[in-house]
Amino acid sequence: MEKVVEMKGITKIFPGTVANDNVNFDLLKGETHVLLGENGAGKTTLMNILYGLYQPEKGEILINGIKTNIMTPNDAIKLGIGMVHQHFMLVHNFTVAENIVLGVEPKKGLKIDINKAVNDVQKIADKYGFQINPNAVIEDISVGQQQKVEIIKALYRGAEILILDEPTAVLTPQEIDELGEIINNLKKEGKSVILITHKLKEVMKMSDRVTIIRRGKITGSVNTIDTSIDELAELMVGRKVQLVVDKKEAKIGYEILKVQDLHVKDHRGIEAVNGVNLTVKAGEIVGIAGVDGNGQTEFIEAITGLKKPEKGSITLSGKDIYGKSPREIGDLGLGHIPEDRHKRGLILKYSLYENSILGIHHKEPFSKRKIMNYEEIRKHSAKIIKEFDVRTPNDEVEASALSGGNQQKLIVAREISKNPDLLIASQPTRGVDVGAIEFIHKRLVGERDSGKAVLLVSLELDEVLALSDRIAVMYDGRIVDILDRKDANEQKLGILMAGGSIDKEVNKNE
């Protein structure tokens, strides 16, 4: 088959790190080729070189057999290459159509022809099976819809080669299926797709071929039909990986968290949490399942002090925390792994040692009378970086220099090191690789087994089912049901997440 991309001998060096080491990669016309690897393996760096965001120290790139220099993203776009980044680049108060045509707007005289823009966007959406409203405002649509906007934006600019960076990291199970259909439609039209991912289930579903990269080097390339999840996991991390969480029977103790009749409004003043009741006890993991945007975020923000509730009560180990500040709640025994590591979890311009004490920076031994004790801070950061295998040259680098998975491990390390009574883990493995997932899952189960209470919020049903002792399902701001793990499965949870009733479905099927 015809090679539309050939990358030969690509080497990229950052200070202290060889990100890509003599890498060879190719893409065939009409195929989906997964670039698989741990966080920090060099996947995104390689694709950023193909898209013109970085320049390699060595190597060459051929597009459709012709050697070319891609110095900027504009060069890549002219060559028919589009890239959808993990963190979207959209103007939130613009419409879908306005975002898609931004910079290449159709004109009617001197004015933008917005009707033509809407029609052009709708044609692309219809052709490839995107369910999207061109007139919707970005801030009013889901994360999955926003990803579709980014893909259509690339297609609008003539992309024949599409690079998707961690495309399923923020999607619900239903949206992942939709993305798979869209990718199949793109392939039928002769487009070629590169997926950067570490999610093995999606690799097996969506790809034709897989290339594995580990610590900057290619370790193998296989046809998807000839491999398995276990083999890919081993190729990716260099060892056998335990893909099933090993969990003992829960030893449930006293009540740690009690939430009663909680009401919370979102940023638009609309009620997002409507009368929620929930308890979490020592020695158990309670998972919250639900499609994104059904009140999970606001519920956690209210418990952690990031948003003031309208009414209700929240107690932590018998102490009233309703309306208290995040610092006050943290001091009373709460640890919080936030869903957005950049917005809530880290200060990206701060060093790792500074980030390692966020939330406890005001306490001894890290400070006394508002004077920081950097010797103790550095001791602490060195300890948790080693214990949690955060891959970094040293603890002086900025948090922004770490891969997404290593940023997440740093946050998990910091929150667990606080020894909280209740650990809230919101999307704890979002955008991290299978090796890091295995590690984070073990640490969360370890917290539960040591008698802590864990409240898990995840869009990954596999994760909720693997870790939880009880599962609460949120729909439209309410908890519609709470199931014991032994009574739960993906089908039942899916029905509840869509606002249905398990009893009705059972009766219908009988």
Image: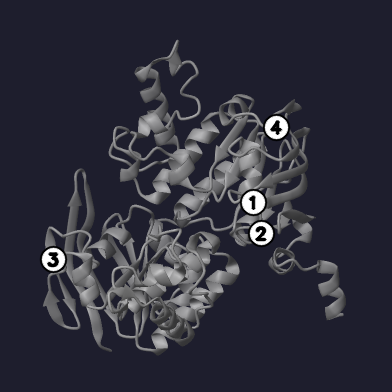
Quarter that holds the N terminus: bottom left
Instruction: Indicate the secondary structure of the residue bearing disc 2.
Output: loop
In screen coordinates, is 106 left or right of 180? Answer: left
Residue at the extreme top of the image, as rendered: 369
Gap between marks 4 and 1 measured at Cα: 17 Å
Q: Position of residue 180 (x, y in %)?
A: 49, 77
Among numbered discs 1 and 2, the one appearing first in the sequence: 2
In screen coordinates, is 155 left or right of 424? Answer: left
**At label 4, which amino acid type do we have?**
Tyr
Gap between marks 4 and 3 measured at Cα: 58 Å
Among numbered discs 4 and 3, the one appearing first in the sequence: 3
Instruction: Indicate the secondary structure of the residue bearing disc 3.
Output: strand
Q: Which residue is mark 2?
A: 290
Q: Residues within 10 Å of mark 4 (few under 14, many from 20)?
A: many
Pick whichever, 44 or 149, lies toward us.
149
Q: Residues within 10 Å of mark 2 (few under 14, many from 20)?
A: many
**At label 1, which amino acid type do we have?**
Gln
Of badges 3 and 1, the one in the foreground is 1
Of badges 4 and 1, the one in the foreground is 4
Q: Position of residue 72 (x, y in %)?
A: 18, 64
Of badges 4 and 2, the one in the foreground is 4
Q: Which residue is mark 3?
A: 59
Q: Which residue is mark 1?
A: 296
Q: Is residue 104 above or below residue 53?
A: below
**At label 3, which amino acid type do we have?**
Gly
Gap between marks 3 and 1 measured at Cα: 47 Å
Among numbered discs 3 and 2, the one appearing first in the sequence: 3
Q: Residues within 10 Å of mark 1 (few under 14, many from 20)?
A: many
Instruction: Indicate the secondary structure of the residue bearing disc 1.
Output: helix
State if disc 2 and disc 3 touch (CB < 8 Å).
Answer: no
